[in-house]
Image: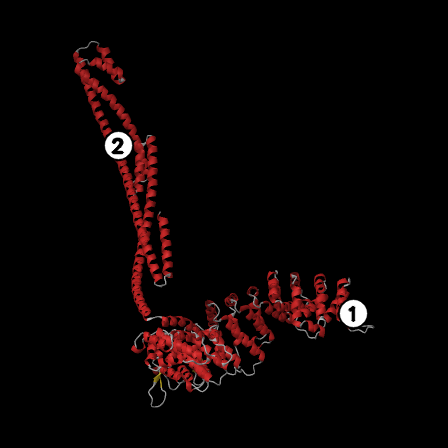
Amino acid sequence: MNFLRGVMGGQSAGPQPSGAETVQKLCDRVASSTLLDDRRDAVRALKALSKKYRLEVGSQAMEHLVNVLQTDRSDSEIIGYALDTLCNLISNDVEEEEPEENAQKTNSDDLAGQFAEIYIKNQENLTLLLSLLEEFDFHVRWPAVKLLTALLKNQGPQVQQIILVSPLGVSRMMDLLADSREVIRNDGLLLLQQLTKANAAIQKIVAFENAFERLLDIITEEGMSDGGIVVEDCLLLLLNLMKNNSSNQNFFKEGSYIQRMKPWFEVAEDNSGWSAQKVTNLHLMLQLVRVLVSPVNPPGATSNCQKSAFQCGLLQQLCIILMATGVPADILTETINTVSEVIRGSQVNQDYFASVNAPSNPPRPAIVVLLMSMVNERQPFVLRCAVLYCFQCFLYKNQKGQGEIVATLLPATIDANSISAGQLLCGGLFSTDSLSNWCAAVALAHALQDNSIQKEQLLRVQLATSLGNPPVSLLQQCTNILSQGDKINRRGSKVQTRVGLLMLLSTWMTNCPIAVTHFLHNQTNVPFLTAQISENLGEEEQLVQGLCALLLGICIYYNENSLENYTKEKLKQLIEKRIGKEIFIEKLAYISKHELYSRAGQKPQPSYNSPEQMLFDHEFTKLVKELEVLITKAVQKSSEDEKKEEEVKKSLEQHDSIVNQYKELIREQDMQLNELKKQVTALTNQNEQGQTTISQQTSQIQQLRDQYNLLKVQGKPLESQHHIHNEAAQINGIQPKADTEEIGRLREEIEKLKKQHVVLEGQLAEKESVIDKLRTIQTTGNAAEVYTNIAGEHSTELCKPVATAEAASGDNDSAAALMKITQLESRLTALDDENQKLKDQVKLLTDEKKTLYQQLASTNSTVAILETDKRKLQQEVTESKKEQDDLLVLLADQDQKIFAFKNKLKELGEPVEDEDDLESADQEDDDDDDDELS
């Protein structure tokens, strides 16, 4: 303890030890002491020395401090001292100066980076530090947060990779935002700012850990734009999460967080006395809105955010700030830029912005008020740039807005009592301020961008130059200013004005042959351009020469040869004689080689440090890229090439007409194919129904045949015939006339008649034999003998009277025999009558039998008819298949023709993607139909 007192400032006798020796002794005490109090005092002493003797403590004590974090986890006080010591070593915020000998070896930043690298060399050290974030003790959690922040500042990418693979690493840091102690929550915000820098993976994880909800809640709790530094930290973290991260931007939009931004921009009517912190907060809030609607974002994401901004009233709130009074200049400038990107390319937002009026008397459109600032040379440069950007965004892909701006220049719509946008642009175009000239020219060029109708309408604009002189067209006035540019005193201003006018004329005449004709109609324009291109001027004038070459090339490329003196061929001959083709192309290349050209092409917003640097517009750079190649080819072509090109154009037009005819033919054939497909589908359905009916009838017929054969084998043909007849009638859709009970009764009667028929046939046979014998007796005369024989052989009833007669009379005479014969004849007559009755019954049964056979024949004929129908249906199916095969052949021929036509269309440069998709879909449908038919 005496040693520690000496270190901490107590008096001791003898020579004082050096800083390195003291640190070494303290490190030995930390490593060897068994008592926790001794180790705690040693670590506290190292903390006190860590700022003054930073190098010695870092090089000797870091390993011991890490061991303390691992072994003494239960004591929060020693853990806090160790973390504070490490934080002093790795942090760049060193209050005390180091000794001179150490300052000569290395500086503070290098030491912090080296110590941070040593600490994270073992990844377990960082994992241990992340686990300490779970400790709720203030003396542990707070220094752990500060140490992690210092490590991220010095070794950001390496620490980020370790945290990414650490389980729950990001989640533990996100829990800091829920800490009730503000100092830990605020330092947690700083930690997350460092963590989310330039790492999209961590940004996504933090966003999905509900960071947006927590940050917006903190901003609301802290007072939004009126809040302090905490609001600024939250906004910086939000910018880190969403800048260049489309996934998080979409998550922010889908979570309906854009709606929660509207209250941020609700400013009071009295806007005087804005604090610096409020200006900073509002500036960051506007930047956050711009991140969501930036032109560099994917188009779909930007349009969705623009739509949400309008629906929730955010755009309306921004327009209120835009038209409010007392707003600081930098906030007003950033608000204009934000509104610009919110409305850029969104027709609904652009229409709303066109309807916004400034609170003036009389009310003026916001566009007019902004243009007044743009052409006013006393306004700040950044504000004028912002207004120009706002006007460009308002006209971007907005043909309706372009028409409204151009209409304010036309004679029929000019109102002498009010200031219009067109009047302001013309005033700026012809003012003495070169920056106003350039801004007005670029603004007018955007009113004509990709709009041939407005280019032609602008040719109608007439300007009054001076009293007594006739009015001149706007096109002619622009060329007049170009030719009189030498009258401007300052050379820099001259260049800027001429560059703006040349950009306006180039945009105006591009893809507008009528404007080219108007330009060439003035006899002085072409000589002026050739003179400018052919002169040997300084570097400042090279850009003007390049733009003059571009304008002359446009006159060649879009020339319809309507003026005899300035046809394409004559203009190219003029270039070849006066300038030279190679020199002309070299001067044309001056534009894209200019140092400010590539800078303007990077993003739509004009961002320049000084007015003299404003020479190029973003949309104009894209136009130059397209025209430079076309003009170079057009100038290098000879007259023969022109003729060949004309012939090629004519042939292409013929081919186009042929292609159009083929397209019409293909459309008609497609319609026919669709109709045929419908017919095939209908026939297929009919065929399927017929097949189903045939299969059902076939199965039923087979069942009836099986039943009939079974009954026939069992000896019951008559009974089965009636049953089969009924079944056949049911197959044909005919219901039996009798019900089930009547059928049973008829079957019983048939059985009885069958039995009676058999008995009667036996009796009839016996009596026929008796009659035959009696007739024989009558013929021979030996009646008694025959009768006796008959009686003995056939009937006991006949034998009895014969035997009695023989016994009584013996040898009676012939008279007695005749009497008996007479009796027998009467008896025979009775038998004949009975026999006739039996024959009638037999005939009746025979008729019934015939009737049953007829019914059986009818059933058989019904079966034959069904089989015939079946054969017909099968034949129809065969014919349908043949027709389908013919259709498939036709479809194959059609596909070959379509494929040939497609190749021709591709050779001719026609787009055929959609038709290919449709044809491939149709072919897949045809294949499916073929599979189903087969």
* Amino acid type, mark 2: Lys
Q: Could you say which is closer to the camera, residue 457 or residue 715?
A: 457
Disc 1 from disc 2: Cα separation: 139 Å
Q: Quadrant of residue 503?
A: bottom left
Residue 4: image tag: 1
Q: Which residue is tagged 2?
A: 849
Residue at (30%, 47%) from the top-left corner? 882
Residue 94 in the image: above or below residue 417: above
Residue 556 relative to residue 231: left or right: left
Counting from the top left corner in percent of width and height, residue 746 is at 30, 35
Q: Nearer the viewer, mark 1 or mark 2?
A: 1
Which residue is nearer to you in this view: 258 or 708?
A: 258
Q: Give the left or right position of residue 55, taking residue 359 as reference.
A: right
| Residue 317 visible within the image | no
Mark 1 and mark 2 lie on one chain; the one further toward the N terminus is 1
Is disc 1 surrounded by few (<14), some (14 to 19) or many (20+) residues within 10 Å? some
- Rendered view: 52 above or below 472: above
Residue 586 occupies which quadrant of the picture? bottom left
- Farthest residue, direction right: 13
Mark 2 residue crowding within 10 angstroms, few (<14) / some (14–19) / many (20+): some
Q: Nearer the viewer, residue 822 or 502?
A: 502
- Under tag 2, what secondary structure? helix
* Residue furthest top as drawn: 811
Residue 278 drawn at (x, y percent): 57, 78
**Residue type marked 1:** Leu
Give residue 380's position: percent from left, percent from top: 50, 83
Label 1 sits on a secondary structure element that is helix
Can residue 237 be seen?
yes
| The N terminus, quarter of image | bottom right
Residue 324: numbered disc = none
